[in-house]
Image (cartoon, rainbow, N blue to C red):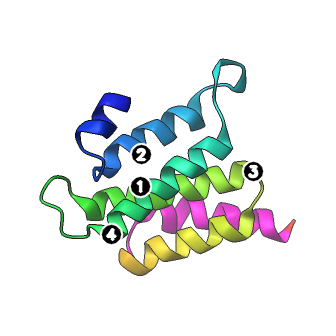
Amino acid sequence: MDDAEKANPQNPVTFIIRGEMKYNTPKIFGGSYEDAVKNFNKAVSICEQYPDSELVDTKWGYLESLAWLGRAYEMIENYDAAKFVYQKALSIQPDFGWVKYVLLPEVQKKMQN
């Protein structure tokens, strides 16, 4: 991952994959929701800086990063931030089913409890 980042630091996919790895790896083996948030935030930032990149489909990367960022925020119980990024994703792609029908309703339910 470090080599990929050095080769193309403007590619959000490196940070998406690193974020997913940190999110899905048990803490005892180096996983960290906080580190996942940092990586997904970096991917979001890159997508916002380079919206018309020819190197990667930044719209897909942007939506993917926002969805995963929201999930990571949920895991650290930052429900307001999760809701914000889910709504941001829906403002870009209103029919993003995973966010619209699963992730956003789940975080709204958590916020009510």
Image point (54%, 69%), residue name: 86
Q: Which mark is residue 65?
A: none
Magenta region:
94-112
> How far apart are the alpha carbons under marks 2 and 4?
16 Å
Does the stretch in magenta take in 75? no
Q: Position of residue 113 (x, y in %)?
A: 87, 65
Q: Name the residue under label 3.
A: 76
- Indicate which disc, 1 or 3, sits on the residue closer to the N terminus: 1
Please state which amino acid type lies under the numbered disc 3.
Ile
Image point (28%, 65%), residue name: 59
Q: Is mark 3 on a helix, strand or loop?
A: loop
Q: Position of residue 80 (x, y in %)?
A: 72, 71
Please state which amino acid type lies under the numbered disc 1.
Ala
> How far apart are the alpha carbons under marks 2 and 3?
18 Å
User: Is the residue marked by circle 2 packed among few (<14), some (14-19), or many (20+) residues within 10 Å?
Assistant: many
Q: Mark 1 points at which residue?
A: 43
